[in-house]
Image (spheres, rainbow, N blue to C red):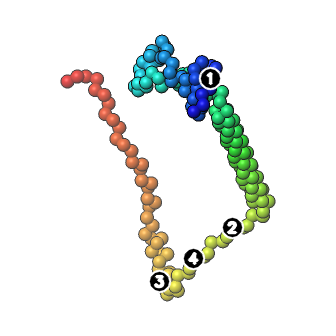
Amino acid sequence: MARTTDAAARRPKTKGEAPKANLLEKEISGITPSFVDYIEEQTGYRPSERDVQLASVLRRDFQKSETNQARMVEAKERKEAEAEARTQRAADRAEAKEAREAARAEKAEAKAKAPKAEPKAKPAAKAAPAKTAAKTAAKPAAKATAAKPAAAKPAARRRPAKAAAATEDF
């Protein structure tokens, strides 16, 4: 394998090696163990000191990377598209509401302008079968003689009143 010199790390670099492999050989910095303790205190999970150091060092590089920048652009475009879709749905709902209200108003106006139909006459009650003259003449006379007094309207039922509070102790 051909070896080249990594100027930043000042160590020989093997061709095909990961670009930041030299970070694995660095000593753990003084703040990393404290940060590991803090992570464990906050989450209940204890990561290795090496993992915490690598994550801390590589975070800035990751944020600047082309991969992350492309991801951020995609996320921004997706967010804008979702906002546009929400705005369009709101406009569609408002338009549909206006159309419904216009239809209601048009229907009410048409109803007000329409001539009112005359109320339908109730069908006449069927006539009773013909009775003999004697029976029909006797019936009104019997009603007149046996006129009952008008029944009084029944009194409304009310709850009995509560007993008055006793003022004297027995």
Q: Residues within 10 Å of mark 4 (few under 14, many from 20)?
A: few
Earlier in the chain: of badge 2 and badge 1, it is: 1
| Residue drawn at point x = 72 percent, y = 67 percent | 118
Image-quadrant location for residue 106: bottom right
Image-quadrant location for residue 9: top right
Label 3 belongs to which residue?
135
Q: Nearer the viewer, residue 14 or 45?
A: 14
Image quadrant in which the C terminus is located: top left
| Residue drawn at point x = 43 percent, y = 24 percent | 48
Earlier in the chain: of badge 3 and badge 2, it is: 2
Q: SS at mark 3?
A: helix
Mark 1 against mark 3, which lies toward the viewer? 1
Marks 2/1: CA–CA distance: 105 Å
Earlier in the chain: of badge 4 and badge 2, it is: 2
Label 4 belongs to which residue?
125
Image quadrant in which the N terminus is located: top right
**Percent of width and height locating residue 160:** 34, 41
Q: Please say if 83 is above or below 20.
A: below
**Percent of width and height locating residue 80:** 70, 38
- Which amino acid, mark 1? Thr
Label 2 belongs to which residue?
119
